Image: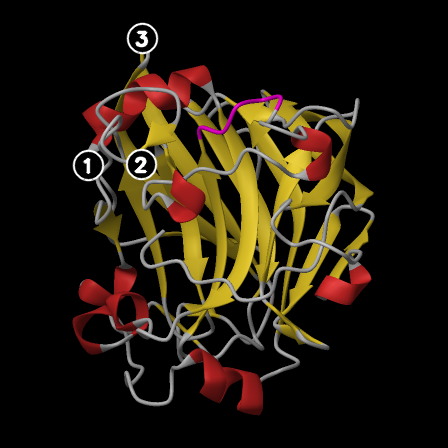
Amino acid sequence: MISLFLLAFTLFGADAPITWQNCTGGTCSQQRGFIVLDSGWRGSDLSSAGVTVSGDSVSQKFKQGNNVGSRVYLLDSTENAYVKFKLVDAELTYDIDVSQIPCGMNAAIYTAEMPAQGTGSGAKSGAGYCDANYVGGEGCAEFDIGESNARATVYTCHGCNATGHAPKGQINCDTNGGAANPYTVDKNFYGNGSSFTIDTSRKFTVVTQFIGSGGKLTEVKRKYVQGGKTYDQPNSLTTGLDAISPSLEIGHVLIGALWASDTDMAWMDAGSNGPCSSNNESTTYLQQNYPNAVVTYSNIKYGSIDSTY
């Protein structure tokens, strides 16, 4: 994730149960897991950080008291290890409501090659984060499945020259990555209102297909489901996949983050990337004007290609 800047350091070790589904050949089985918050947010609980978990859904509110932004992970049924998703020749699907997320804010669902047991105080406390931008000091391969607001969306591949996680200099990661943004080829595909193919004023389903075989990723395709219809994103991702393939075979942890950046989100939602202006996108502006913005993810499914929607 580019220039990640999450404010607030307020929660530690709090988690809540959630259900998700594992699918094969159109048949899905319910799995039990837990949502845990990153260990860097110390001293509070889920609700104090603006995070609500219910059934198969998790919601993240932008500002709750003095807390701004949050980052959460999916634990397995033991509550002591992260779920590791092997993504080559597989797909990951979820429903999302970004209707309240304005320009400049990023509702991100992504994966990273974090260790299953975490580090230090362990996965149960939300420890062990790493990403391709070395946030927190540790680098590792990262796949941004969906970085979105109500006006723009992009998915991005960030491979590294080695698997595992390590400080900068010991592992070299592609911080910019290869990206697929539908706005670059069809300005009317994704946006807030009924004139767009995907209308972000309503909930929709995001399907990400990691096409490949033999441990080698060759293409990442995106489909959307809304109003009972399935839509293919007009572009797909084919660059940077060789570098990330070994990491995706090892398995990635699923992460949800709601964040903003004082360097704005123009790389995602302005100029050639979206209809937003890079003005009025600072974290301070968004705190003052959109403190109650909420993103909700639900109905998470993982399985073989074309099995989850």
- Residue 7 drawn at (x, y percent): 53, 66
Which quadrant would the C terminus be assigned to in this image? top right
SS at circle 2? strand
- Residue 76 drawn at (x, y percent): 72, 26
- The foreground one among 185 and 152 is 152
Horizontal side of residue 250 vs 277, given as left or right: right
The CA distance from mark 2 to mark 3 is 15 Å
Residue at 37 percent across and 75 percent down: it is 262
- The foreground one among 99 and 122 is 122
Horizontal side of residue 206 vs 143, given as left or right: right
List the residue tagged with mark 3: 214
Contact between marks 2 and 1 (CB within 8 A): the answer is yes
Query: How many marks on residues?
Result: 3
The residue under label 3 is which amino acid type? Gly
- Residue 1 drawn at (x, y percent): 36, 51
Horizontal side of residue 266 vs 108, given as left or right: left
Where residue 79 sits, quadrant-wise, is top right
The crowding category of the residue bearing disc 3, from other C-alpha atoms within 10 Å (few below 14, some 14 to 19, many at least 20), is: few
Residue 105 is covered by the magenta coloring = no
Q: Magenta residues, as a range? A: 113-117
The residue under label 1 is which amino acid type? Thr
List the residue tagged with mark 2: 220
Residue at 33 percent across and 26 percent down: it is 211
SS at circle 3? loop
- Residue 247 drawn at (x, y percent): 36, 22
Q: Residue furthest top?
A: 214
List the residue tagged with mark 1: 238
Q: Is residue 216 above or below residue 268?
A: above
